[in-house]
């Protein structure tokens, strides 16, 4: 029998709720689920139509093309322009959106979607089955060079237009994570007309980006801001939205303020009404200001981590990898940099992610002696004049590059300095050359660097397959920058993506997390709590399960 949507995501019985930084002001809170601003609103307040809101963020997208970019910020911004087939609500359940219903084949190799018949792109063209096929085919086309969306489509073999408003999406293998992937902005839909006429320009943003969403991308000034205006015809929000019809706001401006002090200052002075992220050092100050509010949401998906390239010596030696893993005093470093706002991570995935393995907590604490012993056993026993370990006259040195400053967020460079200092104590040199963004991406994903560092917001444990399956090659849009090939990791993550069975998924994803740590493939650093600051007059602002802000329901009180 086919599985008919909407269908809930198989979740753990209890998702971990984060420590949510409450002070004397009102705060929306969440744990990898939707959170809402405006807790102080009067119960009978009526939403105000119109007005302009300015939102400051710390990172500017390299590319605005949702099918090409692998950046969280691209998905976060473009969520307001592009709708999805299905919507994932704050309980992890899937609801209709552009698709009003769907069926899943018993073998999980195909999904048939019955589309709404009243949806139009903002260029006036109709959203239909042909549009779904055109977008999915564009994502997997080699010339698109998709860096993330293609991996979300997994073993996609094609989309069949059954009739104008029915489309069948097929895969070569069972693919259970597809519904969650289909709820993200990365599998959102451009107007086929826009793809045909401006396909090469979609990464530049602005009017070329034509979607069906509540806002229209009307302008972009590189290095400064992006401007969005209300789509007056919008009337197909998911059922969990606070209202149907067009957005309340007339205009949304996103400013790119990379310096924390400038961003927080702009919020405090009223130049912007929403700012993200609020640096951990400033959280209590913002919460103590009666003019401001905060929303705090535990980010799901892959934690921010050091990803170790197992194909590049000396990290091809598991003893060296284990030394790096155990030689970093993470409890001290995370506390000193993030003031308790972010928590030290133990697993590759966050506690708010389904099938998180809590047993990993406290299982690999900082142990300088154990790290020293591992390096001795690996043959790095001599020391040079600066105290770094050597073998055969060669220094034990690891390169961990930095991208340009505008792409570094959350005080990660400061944390990196603490990590460098920790590893120096055990005789490991870590160098951090700053590279231009093109060289950085080419080197990291080309396997030329010892260490990569990144996180991945996704409310599904299939992120483990992207990180550790040998077929998830960075050269083809995957995220396995460990470059490690392991039959068990491949088997477990393949099994996980091929079933909805909760017990099976719990088993294989638990094993995957444990083996990734055991092999020293990754050093999870911190669990991110996304803290957004808002002016007290902001109402109805929500964060989805990926912690991305949605402005369709947002409005400004008088």
Image (tube, rainbow, N blue to C red):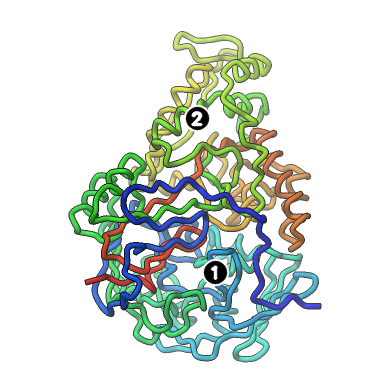
- Asked if residue 536 lies left or right of residue 176, the reply is left
Residue 442 in sight here: no
Identify which residue is drawn at 67% across, 75% down. Answer: 158
Q: Nearer the viewer, residue 94 or 199?
A: 94
Residue assigned mark 2: 331
**Alpha carbons under labels 2 and 1: distance apart:** 37 Å
Give how far across and how far down residue 84 sits, in percent.
53, 74
Residue assigned mark 1: 187
Q: Quadrant of the N terminus?
A: bottom right
- Of the numbered discs 2 and 1, the one sitting upstream in the chain is 1
Quadrant of res 85? bottom right
Q: Nearer the viewer, residue 151 or 33?
A: 33
Quadrant of res 27? bottom left
Give how far across and how far down residue 325 sits, in percent.
59, 29
Q: Nearer the viewer, mark 2 or mark 1?
A: 2
In the structure shown, which secondary structural element does the residue marked by tag 2 occupy? helix
Give how far across and how far down residue 422 sits, in percent.
48, 22
In the structure shown, which secondary structural element does the residue marked by tag 1 occupy? helix
Q: Quadrant of the C terminus?
A: bottom left
Q: Classify mark 1: residues with Cα within 10 Å, few (<14), some (14-19) or many (20+).
A: many
Please say if 17 is above or below 171.
above
Number of the label disc, if any, that sits on residue 555: none
Identify which residue is drawn at 32% across, 43% down. Answer: 284
- Asked if residue 112 lies left or right of residue 54, the reply is right
Please say if 459 is above or below 552.
above
Please say if 264 is above or below 127.
above
The image shows a total of numbered marks equal to: 2
Q: Classify mark 2: residues with Cα within 10 Å, few (<14), some (14-19) or many (20+).
A: some
Identify which residue is drawn at 65% across, 19% down. Answer: 374
């Amino acid at each position: 029998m086919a599985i008919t949507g909407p269908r809930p995501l198989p979740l753990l019985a209890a998702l971990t709720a984060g420590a949510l930084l409450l002070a004397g002001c009102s705060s929306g809170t969440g744990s990898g689920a939707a959170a809402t601003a405006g807790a102080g609103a009067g119960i009978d307040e009526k939403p105000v139509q119109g007005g302009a809101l300015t939102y400051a963020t710390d990172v500017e997208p390299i590319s605005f093309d949702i099918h090409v970019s692998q950046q969280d910020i691209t998905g976060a911004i473009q969520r307001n322009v592009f709708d999805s087939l299905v919507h994932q609500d704050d309980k992890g359940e899937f609801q209709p959106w552009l698709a009003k219903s769907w069926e899943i084949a018993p073998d999980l190799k195909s999904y048939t979607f019955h589309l709404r018949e009243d949806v139009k792109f903002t260029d006036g063209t109709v959203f239909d089955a042909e549009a779904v096929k055109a977008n999915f085919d564009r994502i997997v086309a080699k010339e698109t060079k998709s860096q993330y969306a293609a991996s979300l489509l997994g073993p996609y073999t094609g989309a069949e237009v059954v009739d104008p408003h029915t489309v069948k999406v097929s895969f070569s293998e069972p693919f259970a994570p597809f519904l969650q992937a289909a709820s993200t902005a990365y599998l959102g839909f451009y107007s086929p007309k826009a793809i045909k006429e401006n396909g090469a320009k979609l990464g530049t943003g602005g009017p070329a980006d034509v979607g069906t969403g509540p806002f229209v991308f009307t302008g972009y000034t590189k290095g400064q801001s992006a401007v969005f205006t209300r789509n007056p015809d919008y009337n197909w929000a998911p059922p969990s939205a606070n209202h149907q019809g067009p957005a309340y706001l007339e205009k949304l401006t996103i400013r790119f303020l990379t310096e924390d002090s400038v961003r927080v200052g702009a919020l405090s002075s009223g130049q912007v009404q929403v700012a993200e992220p609020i640096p951990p050092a400033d959280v209590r100050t913002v919460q103590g200001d009666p003019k401001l509010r905060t929303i705090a949401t535990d980010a799901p998906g892959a934690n921010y981590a050091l990803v170790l390239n197992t194909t590049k010596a000396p990290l091809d030696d598991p003893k060296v990898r284990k030394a790096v893993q155990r030689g970093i005093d993470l409890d001290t470093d995370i506390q000193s940099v993030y003031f308790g706002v972010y928590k030290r991570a133990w697993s590759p995935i966050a506690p708010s992610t389904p099938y998180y393995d809590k047993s990993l907590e406290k299982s690999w604490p900082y142990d300088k002696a154990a790290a020293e012993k591992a390096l001795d056993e690996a043959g790095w026993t001599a020391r040079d004049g600066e105290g770094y370990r050597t073998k055969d006259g060669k220094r034990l040195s690891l390169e961990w590059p930095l991208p340009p400053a505008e792409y570094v967020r959350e005080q990660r460079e400061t944390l990196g300095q603490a990590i460098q200092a920790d590893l120096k104590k055990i005789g490991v040199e870590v160098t951090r050359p700053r590279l231009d963004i093109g060289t950085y991406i080419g080197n990291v994903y080309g396997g030329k660097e010892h260490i990569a560092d990144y996180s991945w917001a996704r409310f599904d444990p299939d992120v483990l397959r992207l990180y550790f399956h040998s077929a998830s090659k960075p050269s083809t849009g995957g995220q396995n920058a460990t470059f490690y090939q392991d039959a068990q990791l491949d088997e477990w993550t393949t099994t996980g993506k091929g079933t909805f069975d909760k017990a099976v998924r719990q088993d294989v994803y638990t094993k995957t997390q444990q083996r990734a740590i055991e092999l020293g493939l990754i050093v999870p650093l911190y669990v991110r709590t996304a803290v957004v600051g808002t002016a007290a007059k902001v109402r109805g602002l929500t964060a989805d399960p990926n912690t991305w802000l949605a402005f369709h329901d947002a409005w400004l009180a008088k």
